Image (cartoon, rainbow, N blue to C red):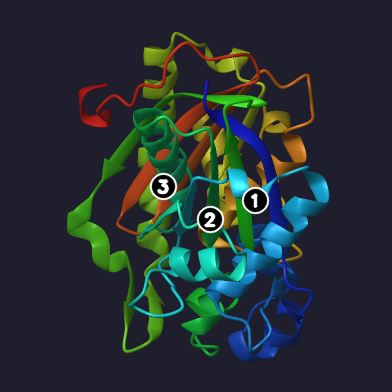
Amino acid sequence: MIGIKEIASYIPENRFSNYDRKNEFHIDDHFIEEKVGVKFLAVKDKDDDTSDLCVKAFDNLLKKSLLDKATIEVVVVVTQNPDKLIPHTSAIVHDKIDLSKRCASFDISQGCPGYVYGLSIIISFMKENGLTKGLLFTADPYSKIINKHDKNTALLFGDAATVTLISDDPSHALGKCMFSTIGKDHMALYEKDGRLHMNGRAIVNFAAKTVPQQIKALLRVSDIKLKDVDKLILHQGSKFIVDTITKRLGIDEQKTIFDISDYGNTVSSSIPIILEKQLRNDQLKRIVISGFGVGLSSASAILFKEKSPTHVCPNAAKA
Protein backbone atom coordinates (compact mmCIF):
# COMPACT_ATOMS: atom_id res chain seq x y z
CA MET A 1 0.00 0.00 0.00
CA ILE A 2 1.40 3.38 -1.08
CA GLY A 3 -0.04 6.52 0.50
CA ILE A 4 0.51 9.60 2.67
CA LYS A 5 2.85 9.12 5.62
CA GLU A 6 3.53 12.70 6.75
CA ILE A 7 3.11 16.33 5.63
CA ALA A 8 5.16 19.41 6.49
CA SER A 9 4.73 22.99 5.38
CA TYR A 10 6.58 26.27 5.28
CA ILE A 11 4.79 29.62 5.45
CA PRO A 12 7.00 32.75 5.35
CA GLU A 13 6.95 34.96 8.42
CA ASN A 14 6.65 38.17 6.35
CA ARG A 15 3.08 39.49 6.40
CA PHE A 16 1.26 42.23 4.47
CA SER A 17 -2.01 43.50 5.96
CA ASN A 18 -5.07 43.83 3.74
CA TYR A 19 -6.48 46.33 6.23
CA ASP A 20 -3.74 48.73 5.16
CA ARG A 21 -5.15 48.70 1.61
CA LYS A 22 -8.76 49.59 2.35
CA ASN A 23 -8.45 53.13 1.01
CA GLU A 24 -6.51 52.11 -2.11
CA PHE A 25 -9.07 49.49 -3.12
CA HIS A 26 -12.18 51.14 -1.60
CA ILE A 27 -13.05 48.13 0.53
CA ASP A 28 -14.18 47.65 4.13
CA ASP A 29 -13.62 45.13 6.92
CA HIS A 30 -16.64 43.07 5.85
CA PHE A 31 -15.17 42.56 2.36
CA ILE A 32 -11.81 41.52 3.80
CA GLU A 33 -13.20 39.15 6.44
CA GLU A 34 -16.35 37.70 4.84
CA LYS A 35 -15.76 37.83 1.08
CA VAL A 36 -12.02 37.35 0.57
CA GLY A 37 -11.44 35.96 4.06
CA VAL A 38 -7.79 37.00 4.05
CA LYS A 39 -6.58 39.51 6.64
CA PHE A 40 -2.86 39.04 6.09
CA LEU A 41 -0.75 37.73 3.20
CA ALA A 42 2.43 35.69 3.66
CA VAL A 43 5.18 36.86 1.32
CA LYS A 44 8.48 35.11 0.74
CA ASP A 45 11.85 36.74 1.28
CA LYS A 46 12.93 38.47 -1.91
CA ASP A 47 16.02 36.24 -2.21
CA ASP A 48 14.02 33.01 -1.90
CA ASP A 49 12.97 31.20 -5.05
CA THR A 50 10.44 28.37 -5.45
CA SER A 51 13.05 25.69 -4.72
CA ASP A 52 14.11 27.48 -1.53
CA LEU A 53 10.55 27.35 -0.22
CA CYS A 54 10.50 23.62 -0.95
CA VAL A 55 13.76 23.13 0.95
CA LYS A 56 12.37 24.97 3.98
CA ALA A 57 9.29 22.74 3.95
CA PHE A 58 11.60 19.71 3.72
CA ASP A 59 13.61 20.95 6.72
CA ASN A 60 10.36 21.03 8.69
CA LEU A 61 9.58 17.49 7.55
CA LEU A 62 12.91 16.28 8.94
CA LYS A 63 11.93 17.75 12.32
CA LYS A 64 8.76 15.63 12.32
CA SER A 65 9.93 12.40 10.72
CA LEU A 66 12.81 9.98 11.16
CA LEU A 67 13.48 10.07 7.43
CA ASP A 68 16.60 8.66 5.84
CA LYS A 69 17.19 10.76 2.71
CA ALA A 70 18.94 7.85 1.05
CA THR A 71 15.61 5.99 0.88
CA ILE A 72 13.90 8.65 -1.28
CA GLU A 73 13.39 7.28 -4.80
CA VAL A 74 11.34 10.05 -6.45
CA VAL A 75 10.83 13.77 -5.92
CA VAL A 76 7.99 15.67 -7.60
CA VAL A 77 7.33 19.42 -7.50
CA VAL A 78 3.91 20.83 -8.31
CA THR A 79 4.36 24.43 -9.48
CA GLN A 80 3.48 26.90 -12.20
CA ASN A 81 6.01 29.39 -10.88
CA PRO A 82 9.31 27.50 -11.19
CA ASP A 83 12.78 28.84 -10.48
CA LYS A 84 13.34 28.96 -14.24
CA LEU A 85 12.03 27.29 -17.39
CA ILE A 86 15.01 24.94 -17.60
CA PRO A 87 15.90 22.86 -15.63
CA HIS A 88 12.87 21.48 -13.78
CA THR A 89 12.58 22.78 -10.23
CA SER A 90 12.53 19.25 -8.81
CA ALA A 91 16.11 18.76 -10.04
CA ILE A 92 17.15 21.94 -8.23
CA VAL A 93 15.41 20.76 -5.06
CA HIS A 94 17.08 17.35 -5.50
CA ASP A 95 20.45 19.09 -5.50
CA LYS A 96 19.73 21.40 -2.56
CA ILE A 97 18.55 18.62 -0.24
CA ASP A 98 21.23 16.22 -1.51
CA LEU A 99 19.22 13.21 -2.63
CA SER A 100 20.53 10.01 -4.22
CA LYS A 101 21.56 9.92 -7.88
CA ARG A 102 19.17 6.97 -8.26
CA CYS A 103 16.21 9.26 -7.41
CA ALA A 104 13.74 10.22 -10.16
CA SER A 105 12.63 13.85 -10.40
CA PHE A 106 10.00 15.73 -12.39
CA ASP A 107 7.66 18.72 -12.16
CA ILE A 108 3.90 18.91 -12.60
CA SER A 109 2.62 22.16 -14.10
CA GLN A 110 -0.61 22.59 -12.17
CA GLY A 111 -2.05 25.18 -9.85
CA CYS A 112 -5.00 25.05 -7.48
CA PRO A 113 -5.98 21.39 -8.20
CA GLY A 114 -2.31 20.41 -8.26
CA TYR A 115 -2.16 18.56 -4.94
CA VAL A 116 -4.83 16.06 -5.97
CA TYR A 117 -3.17 15.65 -9.38
CA GLY A 118 0.18 15.25 -7.68
CA LEU A 119 -1.01 12.57 -5.27
CA SER A 120 -2.53 10.49 -8.06
CA ILE A 121 0.54 10.82 -10.27
CA ILE A 122 3.25 10.12 -7.70
CA ILE A 123 1.35 7.19 -6.14
CA SER A 124 0.68 5.67 -9.57
CA PHE A 125 4.32 6.23 -10.58
CA MET A 126 5.60 4.58 -7.42
CA LYS A 127 3.27 1.60 -7.71
CA GLU A 128 4.14 1.03 -11.35
CA ASN A 129 7.88 1.18 -10.68
CA GLY A 130 8.01 -0.66 -7.37
CA LEU A 131 9.13 2.37 -5.33
CA THR A 132 8.50 2.77 -1.61
CA LYS A 133 9.50 6.34 -0.63
CA GLY A 134 8.79 9.61 -2.45
CA LEU A 135 8.42 13.34 -1.84
CA LEU A 136 5.60 15.44 -3.29
CA PHE A 137 6.27 19.18 -3.06
CA THR A 138 3.87 22.05 -3.75
CA ALA A 139 5.09 25.62 -4.18
CA ASP A 140 3.47 28.44 -6.12
CA PRO A 141 4.82 31.80 -4.90
CA TYR A 142 2.42 34.09 -6.71
CA SER A 143 4.18 37.13 -5.26
CA LYS A 144 6.55 36.64 -8.22
CA ILE A 145 3.75 37.57 -10.66
CA ILE A 146 1.23 39.62 -8.66
CA ASN A 147 0.46 43.21 -9.66
CA LYS A 148 0.26 44.87 -6.25
CA HIS A 149 -2.29 47.36 -7.57
CA ASP A 150 -4.69 44.75 -8.96
CA LYS A 151 -7.61 44.37 -6.54
CA ASN A 152 -8.60 41.01 -8.07
CA THR A 153 -5.36 39.30 -7.05
CA ALA A 154 -3.35 41.51 -4.67
CA LEU A 155 -5.66 40.87 -1.70
CA LEU A 156 -5.83 37.13 -2.14
CA PHE A 157 -2.63 35.20 -2.87
CA GLY A 158 0.06 34.30 -0.35
CA ASP A 159 3.30 32.31 -0.57
CA ALA A 160 3.96 28.89 0.97
CA ALA A 161 5.31 25.42 0.24
CA THR A 162 4.54 21.91 1.44
CA VAL A 163 6.08 18.47 1.19
CA THR A 164 4.21 15.19 1.53
CA LEU A 165 6.10 12.01 2.36
CA ILE A 166 4.65 9.18 0.26
CA SER A 167 5.43 5.78 1.72
CA ASP A 168 4.63 2.07 1.70
CA ASP A 169 3.73 2.54 5.39
CA PRO A 170 1.06 5.25 5.07
CA SER A 171 -1.25 6.86 7.60
CA HIS A 172 -3.74 7.64 4.81
CA ALA A 173 -4.51 5.82 1.58
CA LEU A 174 -5.75 7.47 -1.60
CA GLY A 175 -9.12 6.22 -2.78
CA LYS A 176 -10.88 7.11 -6.00
CA CYS A 177 -10.29 10.47 -7.64
CA MET A 178 -11.91 12.54 -10.37
CA PHE A 179 -10.71 15.26 -12.71
CA SER A 180 -12.34 17.77 -15.05
CA THR A 181 -11.27 20.58 -17.38
CA ILE A 182 -13.17 23.39 -19.08
CA GLY A 183 -10.35 24.50 -21.32
CA LYS A 184 -12.45 26.96 -23.32
CA ASP A 185 -12.51 29.19 -20.22
CA HIS A 186 -8.77 29.03 -19.52
CA MET A 187 -8.37 32.80 -19.86
CA ALA A 188 -10.25 33.33 -16.59
CA LEU A 189 -6.88 32.97 -14.85
CA TYR A 190 -3.67 33.51 -16.78
CA GLU A 191 -0.22 35.07 -16.77
CA LYS A 192 0.91 37.58 -19.38
CA ASP A 193 4.16 39.54 -19.46
CA GLY A 194 5.03 38.35 -15.97
CA ARG A 195 1.76 39.44 -14.36
CA LEU A 196 -1.24 37.45 -13.13
CA HIS A 197 -4.72 38.26 -14.45
CA MET A 198 -7.93 36.85 -12.99
CA ASN A 199 -11.64 37.07 -13.72
CA GLY A 200 -12.87 36.46 -10.19
CA ARG A 201 -16.54 36.12 -11.12
CA ALA A 202 -15.77 33.44 -13.73
CA ILE A 203 -13.71 31.47 -11.21
CA VAL A 204 -16.49 31.63 -8.61
CA ASN A 205 -19.16 30.54 -11.12
CA PHE A 206 -16.98 27.66 -12.29
CA ALA A 207 -16.23 26.45 -8.77
CA ALA A 208 -19.80 26.82 -7.52
CA LYS A 209 -21.18 24.72 -10.38
CA THR A 210 -18.44 22.18 -11.06
CA VAL A 211 -17.06 21.26 -7.64
CA PRO A 212 -20.29 20.17 -5.87
CA GLN A 213 -21.23 18.05 -8.90
CA GLN A 214 -17.81 16.44 -9.00
CA ILE A 215 -17.75 15.66 -5.28
CA LYS A 216 -21.24 14.12 -5.41
CA ALA A 217 -20.21 11.98 -8.41
CA LEU A 218 -17.04 10.91 -6.61
CA LEU A 219 -19.02 9.83 -3.57
CA ARG A 220 -21.47 7.89 -5.75
CA VAL A 221 -18.80 5.84 -7.48
CA SER A 222 -17.09 5.31 -4.11
CA ASP A 223 -20.37 4.12 -2.54
CA ILE A 224 -20.05 6.69 0.26
CA LYS A 225 -22.82 8.96 1.48
CA LEU A 226 -22.17 12.64 2.11
CA LYS A 227 -23.11 12.28 5.77
CA ASP A 228 -20.34 9.67 6.16
CA VAL A 229 -17.62 12.12 5.10
CA ASP A 230 -15.76 13.16 8.25
CA LYS A 231 -14.00 16.21 6.81
CA LEU A 232 -14.11 18.19 3.57
CA ILE A 233 -10.93 20.08 2.66
CA LEU A 234 -11.53 22.45 -0.23
CA HIS A 235 -8.94 24.53 -2.03
CA GLN A 236 -8.90 27.80 -0.13
CA GLY A 237 -9.85 30.03 -3.07
CA SER A 238 -11.61 32.59 -0.86
CA LYS A 239 -14.04 32.50 2.03
CA PHE A 240 -16.92 33.23 -0.33
CA ILE A 241 -16.04 30.29 -2.60
CA VAL A 242 -15.61 27.84 0.28
CA ASP A 243 -18.88 28.97 1.87
CA THR A 244 -20.72 28.72 -1.45
CA ILE A 245 -19.53 25.18 -2.23
CA THR A 246 -20.33 24.07 1.32
CA LYS A 247 -23.91 25.36 1.03
CA ARG A 248 -24.47 23.87 -2.42
CA LEU A 249 -23.25 20.49 -1.25
CA GLY A 250 -25.51 20.61 1.78
CA ILE A 251 -22.75 19.29 4.02
CA ASP A 252 -22.53 20.16 7.71
CA GLU A 253 -20.56 23.42 7.95
CA GLN A 254 -18.59 21.95 10.88
CA LYS A 255 -17.04 19.45 8.46
CA THR A 256 -15.60 22.15 6.19
CA ILE A 257 -12.47 24.12 7.02
CA PHE A 258 -11.53 27.68 6.10
CA ASP A 259 -8.15 28.65 7.50
CA ILE A 260 -6.19 31.14 5.40
CA SER A 261 -6.97 34.46 7.10
CA ASP A 262 -3.38 34.80 8.31
CA TYR A 263 -1.50 33.86 5.12
CA GLY A 264 -3.73 33.84 1.99
CA ASN A 265 -4.57 31.55 -0.92
CA THR A 266 -1.42 29.50 -1.43
CA VAL A 267 -2.61 27.80 -4.65
CA SER A 268 -1.39 24.16 -4.80
CA SER A 269 -0.31 24.30 -1.15
CA SER A 270 -3.68 25.25 0.34
CA ILE A 271 -5.03 21.69 0.74
CA PRO A 272 -1.89 20.05 2.21
CA ILE A 273 -1.37 22.94 4.66
CA ILE A 274 -4.77 22.17 6.16
CA LEU A 275 -4.44 18.41 5.75
CA GLU A 276 -1.21 18.46 7.76
CA LYS A 277 -3.21 19.52 10.83
CA GLN A 278 -5.73 16.70 10.37
CA LEU A 279 -3.46 13.68 9.83
CA ARG A 280 -3.22 12.75 13.50
CA ASN A 281 -6.96 13.01 14.17
CA ASP A 282 -7.98 9.36 14.50
CA GLN A 283 -11.66 10.32 14.36
CA LEU A 284 -11.34 11.27 10.70
CA LYS A 285 -11.73 8.06 8.71
CA ARG A 286 -12.82 9.59 5.40
CA ILE A 287 -11.53 12.95 4.14
CA VAL A 288 -12.61 14.45 0.81
CA ILE A 289 -10.13 16.87 -0.78
CA SER A 290 -10.96 19.04 -3.79
CA GLY A 291 -8.90 21.58 -5.71
CA PHE A 292 -10.15 23.89 -8.45
CA GLY A 293 -9.10 26.92 -10.47
CA VAL A 294 -6.52 27.55 -13.17
CA GLY A 295 -7.30 25.78 -16.41
CA LEU A 296 -10.19 25.87 -15.64
CA SER A 297 -9.72 22.54 -13.93
CA SER A 298 -10.82 20.66 -10.85
CA ALA A 299 -9.71 17.51 -9.05
CA SER A 300 -11.28 15.69 -6.11
CA ALA A 301 -10.29 12.59 -4.15
CA ILE A 302 -11.03 10.60 -1.02
CA LEU A 303 -8.43 9.83 1.63
CA PHE A 304 -8.99 6.90 3.97
CA LYS A 305 -7.54 6.47 7.43
CA GLU A 306 -8.03 2.76 6.99
CA LYS A 307 -6.45 0.95 4.07
CA SER A 308 -8.15 1.59 0.75
CA PRO A 309 -8.77 -1.39 -1.57
CA THR A 310 -7.71 0.20 -4.83
CA HIS A 311 -6.59 3.44 -6.41
CA VAL A 312 -8.95 4.18 -9.31
CA CYS A 313 -9.33 7.40 -11.24
CA PRO A 314 -12.60 7.24 -13.22
CA ASN A 315 -13.28 9.72 -15.98
CA ALA A 316 -15.33 12.56 -14.48
CA ALA A 317 -17.29 12.97 -17.70
CA LYS A 318 -18.64 9.42 -17.38
CA ALA A 319 -19.70 9.76 -13.74
Q: Nearer the viewer, mark 1 or mark 3?
A: 1
Residue indicated by mark 2? 100
Q: Looking at the picture, does residue 246 appear above or below residue 36? A: above
Q: Residues within 10 Å of mark 2 (few under 14, many from 20)?
A: some
Quadrant location of residue 193?
A: bottom left
Of residues 230 and 24, the one nearer the viewer is 230
Q: Residues within 10 Å of mark 1 (few under 14, many from 20)?
A: some
Q: Residue at x 73, y 31 (%)?
A: 254
Residue indicated by mark 3? 207
Q: Quadrant of the C terminus?
A: top left
- Amino acid under disc 1: Lys
Looking at the image, which residue sits at the far left?
184
Q: Tell me the SS state at disc 3.
A: helix
Tags 1 and 2 touching, CB below 8 Å: yes
- Amino acid under disc 3: Ala
Q: Tell me the SS state at disc 1.
A: helix
- Amino acid under disc 2: Ser
Mark 1 or mark 2: whose residue is earlier in sequence:
1
Of residues 235 and 105, the one nearer the viewer is 105
Quadrant location of residue 253?
A: top right
Residue 153 horizontal/vertical position (percent): 51, 75
Residue indicated by mark 1? 69
Give the alpha-carbon distance from disc 1 to disc 2, as whole Å. 8 Å
